[in-house]
Amino acid sequence: MNNMLVQDASQAAQDTRETVVVRIAGDSGDGIQVIGGQLGLTSALSGNDLETFPDYPSEVRAPVGTTYGISAYQIHFGGRHIKTVGDEADMLVALNPAALITNLAILRKGGRVLVDSGTFTARNLARAGYDTSPLEDGSLAGYQVMAADISRLTLESTADLDLGKKATLRCKNFWALGLVYWMFGRDRQPTRDWLEQKFARVPDIARANIAALNAGHAYGETMEASGEAASITVPSAQMEPGLYRSVTGAEALAWGLAAAAELSGRKLVFASYPITPASPVLHTLARLKDIGVVTFQAEDEIAAVCAAIGVAYAGGLGVTSSSGPGISLKQEAIGLAVSTELPLIIVNTQRAGPSTGMPTKTEQSDLNQALFGRHGESPVPVLAARSPADCFETAIEAGRIALTYMTPVILLSDGFVANASGPWPLPQVDKLERINVKNHVEPEGFNPFLRDPDTLARVWPVPGTPGCEHRIGGIEKDFASGHISYEPDNHQKMTDTRAAKIAGIARSIPALIPDQGETRGDLAVVGWGSTYGPISRAVTAMREKGHKVSHIHLRHLNPFAANQSELLAGFSRILVPEMNSGQLLRQLRAEGVAHAEGLNKVAGQPFLVREIEQAIAKSMGAA
Amino acid sequence: MNETLNPKAMKPADYATDQEVRWCPGCGDYAVLKAMKTVLADIAAKRENTVFVSGIGCSSRFPYYIDTYGFHTIHGRAPAIATGILLANPDLDVWIITGDGDGLSIGGNHLMHLLRRNLNCQVLLFNNETYGLTKGQYSPTSRVNTRSPSSPSGSIDHPVDPTQFALGSGARFVARAVDTQVKQLVDVLKAAHAHPGAAFVEIFQNCIVFNEDVFDDFTARDKAANNQVELQHGAALVFGEDQIRALTFDPKALGLKAVDIAAGDHAGALVHDVTNRNLAFALSQMTPPELPMAMGVLYDNPAEVYDVGANREPSKRALQDVMQSGFTWTVEPGATAI
């Protein structure tokens, strides 16, 4: 225990906590995301619900020891349903001084911090910007500091393997993980199995990592036996029975698109140009060639959307995906899809803007762009996904609307939803409702703008169909014949028809009901997209305190659910938290919800639960 | 190139639509339209399997006048939309109609990538060295000092040569034709169609309103013979009235030069080889009056056609298997303990 330093040990008592937030930080080469993922899986196996979020540096590989090269992973797990990654961390693992200085602010007062004291050299301290060592200058008073020379202890634990110092030091992330496992009573076996499988071809590497994992764990047990630190018990959560996996929003979205294709019997062609943070959707789908998914890495954003439109013209499910700046480039082509009334899904994984902005940081500031970013009168349905798992359902809903109504659909995700992950009860794709859309094959009386009288969708004749040869384009079409027309009255009629078609989608949207709380009351918190987690948690907490507050979360942002205005009218106050300057708020007010008030944050960071709680309290106090 | 055999003999008129053609009287586009209908009839193209895709510009109205499938898209993007059409259905026979502005200015990027990918389609670039639809501004192929509404004292931009652009982009079929030289145009279009992969054809098209006779230096009746060389694979590169001029290799300049020959004596002339890319580049660089314009097929050397290859083999797994792959766990009913 000679390399152990415990300050403020009085707080290290036997402890049971409903939920725990752990943040792990280190150099981008330290394998932070790997051990974070392992902690997530073992926590799920322990019966916890959880949510995780990786916090990568924007530099591809920054110099070792620098603050801008720090990679972090935050996980919130516990004995109830977990909807956020947590406002603050209960435990911080910092594998070097730069990791400590960049992440300490998120650790709650009294929280535990595990540092690799072996990295606190004069050189690393200077690189991180410390004048004096925080392990010695008292600046960590008020935290439970566990300072272990993880580097040296890792070398010792694997001494018999003779891997060389460099390779061995790569195992120190698993030493830290071992200590975290001891701290929260996690089972090491799934991680040992994972390591053996992962390094099956280099068994010594697997053995070294397992030895480090075990050594970290033993270190914790020794501390506990000597009364220096205590482990924490986190109870299991009540999870719905079923088969689970961990899923990120990007994966769920990609699979939802593939599901929409399967449910409609269409070939999925996904055309995209790489952009942060949207690329993981492309990466996920690129691995599905064997199930018939086509991905096309286009030369630019415009080519990507145009290829997707070509796919739709030829009868496939065309999808393009990007982030805000790329969506700007696609907007002209989306206008073509509006005019030619072709089905198309445009996914926007939003990031902080404008321009390059902060590509790795999250924001909800592209709602106005989705609603109004095109030329001409060009209404487009807009949907938003609220959580990683919800991306799957929302993608299928986007497919349903696009194919049923012959229209482009914009699906809004964001950098948070895309990268966050949590346990997902796997749906059975063959049990989901099918999307029944047929191609038009009847030459008799054919023209390409024949419409379904109910949905107003035009027919979908595709090349290869004898007798349905036709020409379409971006020039205005005659309502009756589908031929080019510059007639004033016809343009009015076509404009009205396209608008009525989109507005009519509302009839197919399920009635909006509160996610929590009553359908009438003092206050409704209305959100969309990834603010779901913090709003939900804040509303739960405020309801537990006796406040009559409801949470209403919108998936459909254009058109709104038909009963939305009526539902919102039942609340004397409406609070609309958004990671923008009030874009949904403006829409709600335009729809007559004049008493809606905004709670706005444009910082590249998700809302903290307490920020929303405070806003609710303020609003209730003012009532 | 695609299988378009049709047992029923087709006539050019079978490919006409009921739409009134709206190009200016005397426009070169009429001649190209006529040649195209002849080609479609000659190859017995199945109307339902044929798709014309265009961008924006005078020539891009072309699809409205051919009774097949047609998509008049947005400025410069026809290659990208055609790519999507072929990704969804590789069995379609796709013709892209573009112009010098549409294909080399706003859409130059897409054209380059379509050619390097070797997408299986034909690209017809109508080059009239002007922006016709927007009333005569200079284009990326306009020669230096072109006077136009947007360059009243003469343009200063150096032009791009479409065939050199195509060869540089990796095109495996590059050809040239003149709108009104019907036989040459029909032959070139058929060769383009027969080529597997992307086939690029530059068509010199006379804009009668904004750029009349801009190609007269090699298309005028009295100048064509001396200022065009008709390329035929395996034939000597000879030209001129009475065929008394020949192209030979100039080792000093690492290029081509024209020499006088005795009528019928082709011994000293280079022989055209459509599979020789260096020769194609050299031919593409010839301009009158020093050297003749090379017309016909400059390069035809098929390579692997773009094929995304999805679902070629019967799939062993379904989406459900994908989602259930990797690490999964089961929560039993009522189980909450560790």
Image (tube, coloured by chain):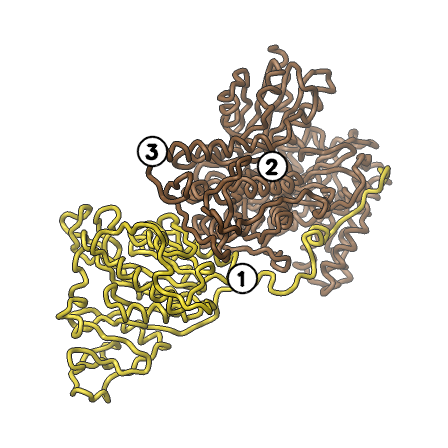
Chain colours: A brown, B yellow
> Are the residues tagged 1 and 3 within 8 Å (C-beta)?
no
Q: Amino acid at mark 3?
A: Pro
Q: Is residue B178 visible?
A: yes
Q: Is residue A121 visible?
A: no
- Checking the image for residue A488, the label placed there is 3
> Are the residues tagged 1 and 2 within 8 Å (C-beta)?
no
Depicted B305 relative to depicted A127: above or below: below
Q: How far separated are the C-alphas under marks 1 and 3?
A: 44 Å
Q: Amino acid at mark 2?
A: Ala
| Badge 1 element | loop
At a point 25% along the width and 46% down the height, the residue shown is B134
Q: Which residue is mark 1?
A: B308
| Badge 3 element | helix
Depicted B225 relative to depicted A36: above or below: below
Q: How far separated are the C-alphas under marks 1 and 2?
A: 30 Å
Taking the image as shown, residue A392 lies to the left or right of residue B133, namely: right
Q: Depth check: A108 or B38 in front?
A: B38
Q: Which residue is mark 2?
A: A385
At a point 26% along the width and 83% down the height, the residue shown is B236
Label 1 marks a residue whose chain is B
Task: Point out residue A253 in the picture as x, y percentages from the top left corner.
Answer: 61, 44
| Badge 2 element | loop
